[in-house]
Image (spheres, rainbow, N blue to C red):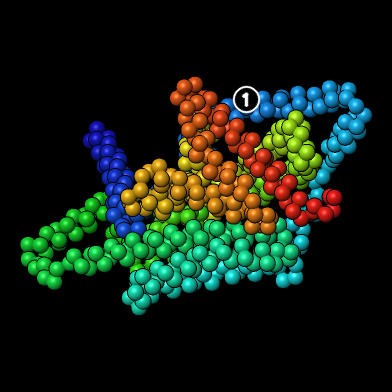
Amino acid sequence: MSGETHSAAEENKVRYRRTQSVTRAEEITKKESEQRKSQPDKPCHRPRDSLFSWSSGFDNFTGLVNWGFLLLTMGGIRLVLENFIKYVLALMPPDYVHFLTVVFDLVRYGIRVDPVQWFTVLTGKGEGEGYPSVLLISYSLVPVMICLMMERALASDIIPESAGMAVHIVNIIVLVLIPMVVIHVKGHIFSLVGAMTVCFIYCILFLKLWSYVQVNLWCRAEKKQHRHSRTGRRQSITIATLQNGRDQEAERTANGSATGYSNEKDKVPALVHYPDNLHPVDLFYFLLAPTLCYELNFPKTNRIRKRFLIKRMLEVVIGVHIVMGLFQQWMIPSVRNSLVPFSNMDLTKTAERLLKLAIPNHLMWLCFFYLTFHSFLNLMGELLHFADRNFYSDWWNANNIDTFWRTWNMPVHKWCVRHLYIPVVELGYSKVAASVIVFFFSAFFHEYLVSVPLKTFKVWAFTGMMAQIPLSFVAKYMETNYGPRWGNMLVWASIILGQPLAIMMYYHDFVITNYNDVLV
């Protein structure tokens, strides 16, 4: 009987020790989180999984039901319009019949998928001599190193604050202007994919360097404020203080042996403080990390999950092929066939072409979203031990436009809030004015990413982004007066129809600008 009692006591002791270990680990994690939050770099990342990961526990996909109904409705309307054009207008004079015959001959495009062309496009074989896109991407390291050298000079008080910030501003603005000037002057030697890649990378660098400079500015201001607030008097250390410190250290050692933790494991990971972060390794980690917001201490994972990593790698490879196949087989012919009715302002035919283009464009956009925000960014996060995987939220459940723009692209949303919206509000502007400035900023870069590679400087993307402001009021009105489902349907409709309309307009302007003589 005494043996059983002794065994039960030992088991309870082990359980108590395990409970203490878990509690101790939670205390360490909590303490590390509190220390990170107290840093002057205003950290905005925390460990979490993406919503499409099983470990996230998220299961609210009701917005996708609305998406399915809306997509089926649009497909039905397109078939009605196609049948109307084919059978009703065919009863009209022979000129119309001849025109429709030509158009429907164009529609019969057969199988267009050609992996050889994919290889040609992705490897840049369509570019001129010397691969100018690769050269421009390599040159992007120059403004990065200028930024790091300026930060080191500012941290060491080698140059005044005003001069350093002026150099930073010029450096970042020139960074954005370089692709515009080079592609405009030497655009004939750039492939379309190469020019788009250059513009995208330079955009990302612009946002990251802005964040890097601003965070270091916050840290520098905090350091100077702390330096000025310190008094010259040293605090005296009494014997009681020393004894109290020894008692606390002994208690920590005892707790460590009781809970199974060693002293090294019990220690909260040391945080990097300014200016120790001004190192090329730290900067290049941030440039590769799947975030636009810089911090001195990013949340890290302890290991790489091999199965998770392999799944994401397979998704990236398969996803690229799916997107390329959809684009080549479905998108390109639909865009080409929309040129004639769009130029002639044939509203019925244009509406049918728009709806026909909307479906493949939308499917490709959804594939591209999953490929980029779930597969690729999680792949990079896993390789770099980056713990914050909040790359998107449940945008499919958005009941108004504002919610959609806050949830579908979380890296850009965090950057806009942290580095644009909040600083503008702190300058004394209203929240409405700050929101308009954020939309204006976003509209500029949407236009930049389209117009610069196409060398067709229109304002369709800019106008479409700015149109989101009045559209948000309409969506909120629908949500308030007719229920959240109608607000969600309006959000889906704007996504499905807005993009193909912009594509048709840009393709029309691009063809007219570059091939008008051939068409005439």
Element marked by disc 1: helix
Residue at coordinates 24% horizontally, 35% vertically from top-left?
Answer: 5
Image side of residue 219 versus residue 443, left or right = left
In percent of width and height, residue 118 lies at 75, 53
In percent of width and height, residue 222 lies at 28, 62
Within 10 Å of disc 1 (Cα), the crowding (few <14, some 14-19, many 20+) is: few
Q: Nearer the viewer, residue 317 or 506?
A: 506
Q: Nearer the viewer, residue 168 or 142?
A: 168
Residue at coordinates 75% horizontally, 37% vertically from top-left?
Answer: 345
Circle 1: residue type: Phe
Residue at coordinates 77% horizontally, 58% vertically from top-left?
Answer: 120
Rendered position, 183 above or below 325: below
Image quarter where the N terminus lies is top left
| Residue at the limit of the structure toward the left, as seen here | 239
- Whether residue 480 is visible here, answered yes or no, is yes
Q: Which residue is mark 1?
A: 69
Residue at coordinates 38% horizontally, 73% vertically from top-left?
Answer: 163
Q: Nearer the viewer, residue 118 or 424?
A: 424
Rendered position, 319 above or below 280: above
